[in-house]
Amino acid sequence: AGDARGPVPGDGTGPPAPERVLFPPTFSVSEIKNKQRRHFMFLRWKQQQRKEKLALKKKRRKEREALGDKAPPKAIPKTIENQRVYDETTVDPNDEEVAFDEATDEFAPYFNRQTVPKILITTSDRPRGRTVRFCEQLATVIPNSHVYYRRGLALKRIIPQCIARDFTDLIVINEDRKIPNGLVLSHLPDGPTAHFRMSSVRLRKEIKRKGKEPTEHVPEVILNNFTTRLGHSIGRMFAALFPHDPQFIGRQVATFHNQRDYIFFRFHRYIFKSEKKVGIQELGPRFTLKLRSLQKGTFDSKFGEYEWIHKRREMDTSRRKFHL
Amino acid sequence: SPQVVWSMLGNRQFCSYKMTTKTQNFCRNEYNLTGLCNRSSCPLANSQYATVREEKGRCYLYMKTIERAAFPRRLWERVLLSKNYEKALEEIDENLIYWPRFIRHKCKQRFTKITQYLIRIRKLTLKRQRKLVPLRRKLERRENRREEKALIAAQLDNAIEKELLERLKQDTYGDIYNFPIHAFDKALQQQDAESESESDAEREEEEDDDEEDVNKREFVEAEDSELSDFEDMDKLETSSEEEQEEEEEVEEKASHSKSKGKTPLKGPARRKRPYIEIEYEEETEPSTKTKAA
């Protein structure tokens, strides 16, 4: 492209950009060797593109208004949730098989109100300040839970002791470089064990606009978006941590929200301002979990039977495929 | 001869096994007895030398004598020591009889140290071992990014609020929250479902009545001005919600009137007929943030 370049600035403050810049057909901005000029031309080109796009939008809007009622419905934007690859293990709410399974699995005694949850919270060896404080706060959030420190005890030896003392669940918070980064949740009388990767842990003092301490009332539980079979079992695991009858006077709610395989935990206090408006205020710690593996029996890393492990190469191939 | 070797390697010239640090010299030779670079512990500069080394959990005594100095392949003689600690010490003594005291002593010391660390290894393997799993930088970064995006997509506050309102609607909270409009609303919905046309007619009549009421505003004002304060309206009391409010046209007038201050009663005009029409309170008041006590 020899001389037909359109107005070229002499010293950067050339003639103002014309309304429509005419480029010869075989010209591309990237061919200019001079960086300053190239940059300038590129900006000009970008402006032009934007103008065209705006004009197109306006035109479309006018058309839409002109058509009035007969206009075609607005296109729904594609989101990752819309485009999610259909998972064949998605639970249909009317599925009898699933209902039967859930009536006879390890959580059945809890859901039949035969057992009251009693939780033991512990950490890996030598916990550091943040982890300790996080454990304490978690203990205030989950009713009927106790924190014990591990001084070099093997998990395999703790578990029979816990079962003997009537604990229903065991939570182990793994720590790395002074921050908690893993969670092992084990339902005790030979229940499934789930291993999570924990991230963005916020203690109570780090949450902005937080309320007062969580009280002793039993909170409600919200489980969102657990659709597949796997998600269902994990959801039930979480539900089994809390006693069955929430005390509504306490107005506290613990939420486990699953989005794209990340489980967000939040603890709020709510108040109904009117029947169509509710205000929530966050108390309590918050963290996100990502499931790494689900094991059938209690914690046993060598000989356990794994129901589900996250295999990176097989499961992370598609960005639209989620497992929970 | 060993003296010559030492004068060369030890002090002046280069010895590849020698490692110097600020305070000390070390010897990296695998046959060295003490690990330091000394005249007496250099295996190269001593023609008669012995060490204890361990291989795969078994300890051996290695010896070197002048006679075999010409045969490098046969230079180091190896003797397996027994597993029993005392017996092994006796074996060392037996083999190194008539050897210099220093070498004997150091061999026994070294042997003791080796057995101690072998015991520790065996004990540790029985306990649970911490497995170090290396983090993968790319994976960590990818997961963090995806987590942030999932957080934004989740819109947690909205989801929680929606869920709570759902539960309120489905009456899971029972009688704790007295929003009586709720019950009326259900009844009204049933009514509407049954007879739509009637309600339409009623609504038309209503509107006529509204206008009439607005014209009759003076009468209404004299009676009710003391009762209905605008201040009461601002507080979110259930009694205020029970006050029957108008549809949007009158509502806008009400909002205008509020902004002007004391104005003739245009807001919730009292109906003179025994007719209940419940509308929802529109959000025109500033929503006060209530701290849950």
Image (tube, coloured by chain):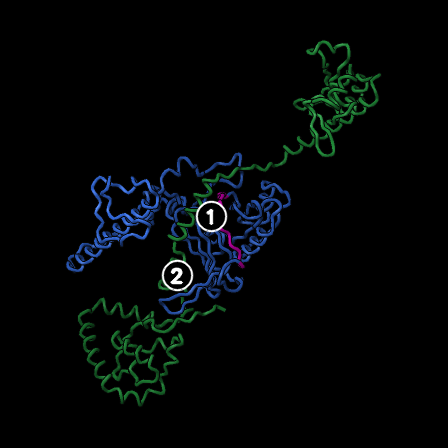
Q: Is residue B166 left or right of residue B201?
A: right
Q: Is residue A165 left or right of residue A199?
A: right
Instruction: Pinpoint residue B54: horizontal percent, then vertical percent.
Output: 69, 23
Instruction: Pinpoint residue A52: horizontal percent, then vertical percent.
Output: 23, 52
Residue B230, quarter of the rendered image: bottom left
Q: Can you see residue B58?
A: no
Q: Could you give the CA–CA distance between mark 2 and mark 1, rounded to whole angstroms? A: 22 Å
Q: Can you see residue A234?
A: yes
Callout 1 amino acid: Leu
Disc marking residue A289: 1
Instruction: Pinpoint residue A137: horizontal percent, then vertical percent.
Output: 55, 56
Q: Is residue B91 left or right of residue B139?
A: right
Count neighbours of disc 1 (C-alpha within 10 A) and say few if under 14, some if 14 to 19, many if 20 or more: many
Mark 2: which secondary structure?
Answer: helix
Chain letter of the residue beneath label 1 in the structure image: A
Q: Residue at x 30, y 41 (%)?
A: A32
Disc 2: which residue: B161
Which chain is drawn using blue?
A
Callout 2 amino acid: Glu
Does the magenta run of residues contain B129?
A: no
Residue B101, quarter of the rendered image: top right
The span shown in magenta is A191-205
